[in-house]
Image (cartoon, helix red, strand yellow):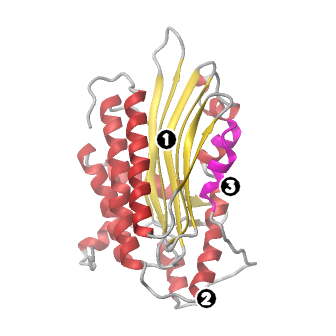
Amino acid sequence: MSHSGNDPEITAVKSYLLDLQDRICSTLEQEDGAAPFMEDTWRRAAGGGGRSRVLSEGALFEQGGVNFSHVFGEGLPASATAQRPELAGRRFEALGVSLVIHPYNPYVPTSHANIRFFMASKEDAAPIWWFGGGFDLTPYYPFEEDAIHWHRMAREACIPFGETVYSRYKKWCDEYFYLKHRDETRGIGGLFFDDLNEWGFSRCFDFMQSVGDHYLLAYLPIVQQRKTLTYGERERDFQLYRRGRYVEFNLLYDRGTLFGLQSGGRTESILMSLPPLVKWRYHWQPAPGTPEARLYEKFLRPQDWLAEETRGAVDRY
């Protein structure tokens, strides 16, 4: 859906985001087949609110959260204006959809997606606005064809917007979802973009929608391919250990988590991204030659996954 002009249309953004939340929830609910998303609508005392949806203990998904929020206020927290002093003294609106899906089966990756719009305004001045978001995949057991499919969909989302868009936002994703203290990426990446406004409102909004619409195209075939694989205690144990990295990233580095908590956001909705069960171990290392070791050797290092495609990797999708 295209919009003419460059004036921000918050109503159109909100309408798209609510519809995206509906589509993703109904598709994942159908795929799970056992548990519904429970909806929790909430209000924020300082302005705005949201619609949180969580699926717990399904047949396929151990926990999944798909949140919509639209919050506004008269001023931003110091953490936001420190980086962008031009935002001080402006009222703000922030709206977005954020989701994290944690499957039971260790062969099915965890996935995350987020798309958002931010606007800060004051009288007698042009509004400051931008879009941000992306999606990334965190596999526990490595399958090259899954990584290729995921990145192919990421590239398809970007192609109409320019030849360099995928490579730029893929690189940003690799750099953003990186655990410095572990010297590893959170997973195989995907797309990450922020502060996007240089194309004008209409084209930036179209891009946000393209990213949002490609999430299910990227994730669902991988879920369907892996969900019937048999796993045992060893694989489940490794999955729970690796989930600890997800927690470490979200609590130490994730901008959305930090902004949400510092701006008085709803704690339950912000922390719904955390997995229900996690294990930590002291100085654990995978044994050489195992699938677990292969994850560390290749899949937790930035890769050009679409170069694999040109070398004739198997395409199962």
Q: SS at mark 2?
A: helix
Residue receiving disc 2 = 233
**Nearer to us: label 2 or label 3:** 2
Residue 194 visible at all? no
> Is residue 268 a member of the stretch shown in magenta?
yes
The amino acid type found where label 3 is placed reads Leu
Q: Quick check: 102 above or below 129? A: below
Residue at left 41%, top 49%? 22
For the C terminus, the image quarter is bottom left
Residue at left 23%, top 46%? 160
Q: SS at mark 1?
A: strand
Q: Which residues are magenta?
A: 259-274
- Spatial CA distance of label 1 from label 2 is 37 Å
The amino acid type found where label 1 is placed reads Gly
Residue receiving disc 3 = 251
Disc 1 or 2, which lies upstream in sequence? 1
Residue at left 52%, top 76%? 140
Mark 2 and mark 3 residues within 8 Å of each other at the beta carbon: no
The amino acid type found where label 2 is placed reads Glu
Residue 51 pos. (x, y %): 54, 43
Q: Residue furthest right?
A: 282
Q: Residue furthest top?
A: 124
